[in-house]
Amino acid sequence: MQLIFVLLGNLFGAFIELVGRKGLISGATIVAFLAVTAAFIVCMKQFIAIIAATILMPAWLSAFLGMFVPSNAVGCVSAILSAKTCKAAYRFAMRKINALNTAA
């Protein structure tokens, strides 16, 4: 009879350990996902704010370039490149999080 109680206790302990470990890994994955997503959002907002604040062009240059290129072309190209950089960093971080989650 004692052997049955010992076996049941060990099985219950192993089950709790497995569920607890998976729960902690899942929780850590969710927290890491939220942190990376928040960093991505802040990164994009800062890039847009910096680009909007630093693009100043003299009137004569704007008039000349306005015939060939839109006045906000530099800002558009900068925003596109910055967004691609942030997206690449975000995807890299998410791949690392997924790799850590599937390794456990």
Image (cartoon, rainbow, N blue to C red):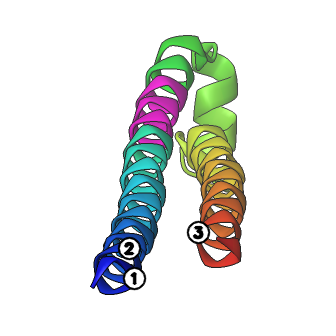
User: Taking 3 as reference, is 75 left or right?
Assistant: right
Is residue 43 rendered magenta in the image? yes
Residue that appears at 59% across and 20% down: 55
Residue 64 spot, x, y in % from top left: 68, 36
Mark 1, residue position: 3
- Provide the secondary structure element on which disc 1 rests: helix
Measure how far apart labels 1 and 2 are at the Cα level. Answer: 5 Å
For the stretch drawn in magenta, the main secondary structure is helix
Q: Are marks 1 and 2 in contact (CB under 8 Å)?
A: yes
Mark 3, residue position: 101
Q: What amino acid type is highlighted by mark number 1?
A: Leu
- Of mark 2 and mark 3, the one earlier in the sequence is 2
Mark 2, residue position: 6
Q: Which residues are magenta?
A: 38-48
Q: What amino acid type is highlighted by mark number 2?
A: Val
> Residue 29, labelled with which disc?
none
Is residue 99 rendered magenta in the image? no
Q: Within the image, what quadrant is residue 60 found in? A: top right
The N terminus is located in which quarter?
A: bottom left
Q: What amino acid type is highlighted by mark number 3?
A: Asn
In front here: 103 or 84?
Answer: 103
- Provide the secondary structure element on which disc 3 rests: helix
Above or below residue 63? Residue 91 is: below
The C terminus is located in which quarter?
A: bottom right
User: Taking 30 as reference, is 36 left or right?
Assistant: right
Residue 33 spot, x, y in % from top left: 44, 53
Measure how far apart labels 1 and 3 are at the Cα level. Answer: 36 Å
In front here: 43 or 93?
Answer: 93
